[in-house]
Amino acid sequence: MGIIVKFNETERLFSRLSDTFSSIIETGLNPEIASTIKQQTKHIVTSLSNRNISTKNIVDRMFQIDQTLEDHVVGTCLVSALIGSLYFDKTELHELVECGLYHDVGKTLIPSHILNKPGKFTLQEYEIMKQHPIFGAQILTSAIESGAKIPEQAICVSLEHHERLDGSGYPYQKTDLSIFSQIVTIADVYSALAMKRVYQDGMDIDGIFKTMDKMVLNQTIYDDFKRMNASIPNLKDLAA
């Protein structure tokens, strides 16, 4: 089978992760469970990316161009799945996690001197960076058309994860956004703010929510996530 991983292995891993999510929602999060969840999610990311040559190449390129991107992708997948567990069944959750995995794939076409710049972007650099959702949708469309085992919803999420419901986002100022995109957007922002990146230190939880409160997000989903965050101590540790 080479690098191709059987689909039922991914299903088995995801089922275990879903069960762990149910446990922490009921009983809370401790460092041991946090470590277990991160390891389970990393196994799922590896399993999903290794299903065929196309997906492996895509994910390998993502993680090579930005050394922090693997942790960010894992954090985004985790938080997306936690939020999604409030709304979706396991099949939809599985698809949501895959969308989280591929949401930033367009960054593979951003020049590394811009992507990994430690300081503030120039206006021109920022305009280039704002193209990564379009690049991601193009990469995923091409991969799916070539037979890659990637859900088509991932194209939508890649394209929409920087859009906002009031049209203030980019690249197209869309307002009619898929529910998958709206969940991954919240998870993406939460993980990005929690993490230490080349251009910023990780924020504390008060700073994260002060920043997110100013964004135009799906208010129902965002409020549900804030309640979840309040009820699960150390949830930030999963995203960072």
Image (tube, helix red, strand yellow):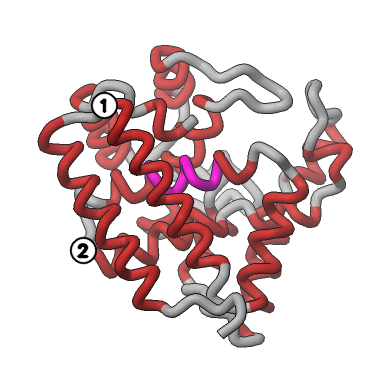
Tell me if I can see residue 183 in this picture: no
Placement of the N terminus among the 4 image quadrants: bottom right
Observer-side mark, 2 or 1, equals 1
The reply to whether dot 2 and dot 1 touch (C-beta < 8 Å) is no
108 on left or right of 47: right
Find numbered disc 2 in the image and state the secondary structure of the residue it sits on: loop
The spot of residue 206 in percent (x, y) is 40, 13
Of 187 and 182, the residue lying toward us:
187
Within 10 Å of the Cα at label 2, are there few (<14), some (14-19), or many (20+) other Cα atoms? few
Q: In the image, is residue 78 part of the stretch drawn in magenta?
A: yes
Q: Earlier in the sequence, mark 2 or mark 1?
A: 1
The spot of residue 47 in percent (x, y) is 49, 65
- Badge 2 amino acid: Asp
67 on left or right of 222: right
Tell me if I can see residue 38 in this picture: yes
The spot of residue 96 in percent (x, y) is 39, 59
The residue wearing badge 2 is: 89
Residue 59's place in the image compared with 208, above or below, is below
Residue 100's place in the image compared with 129, above or below, is below
The spot of residue 166 in percent (x, y) is 47, 41
Residue 74's place in the image compared with 189, above or below, is below
Q: Residue at x 23, y 47 (%)?
A: 20
The residue wearing badge 1 is: 30
Q: Residue at x 36, y 56 (%)?
A: 179
Residues rendered magenta in the picture: 72-79
- Badge 1 amino acid: Asn
Find numbered disc 1 in the image and state the secondary structure of the residue it sits on: loop
Overall secondary structure of the magenta section: helix
Q: Residue at x 44, y 59 (%)?
A: 44
Within 10 Å of the Cα at label 1, are there few (<14), some (14-19), or many (20+) other Cα atoms? some
The image quarter in which residue 33 lies: top left
The image quarter in which residue 35 lies: top left
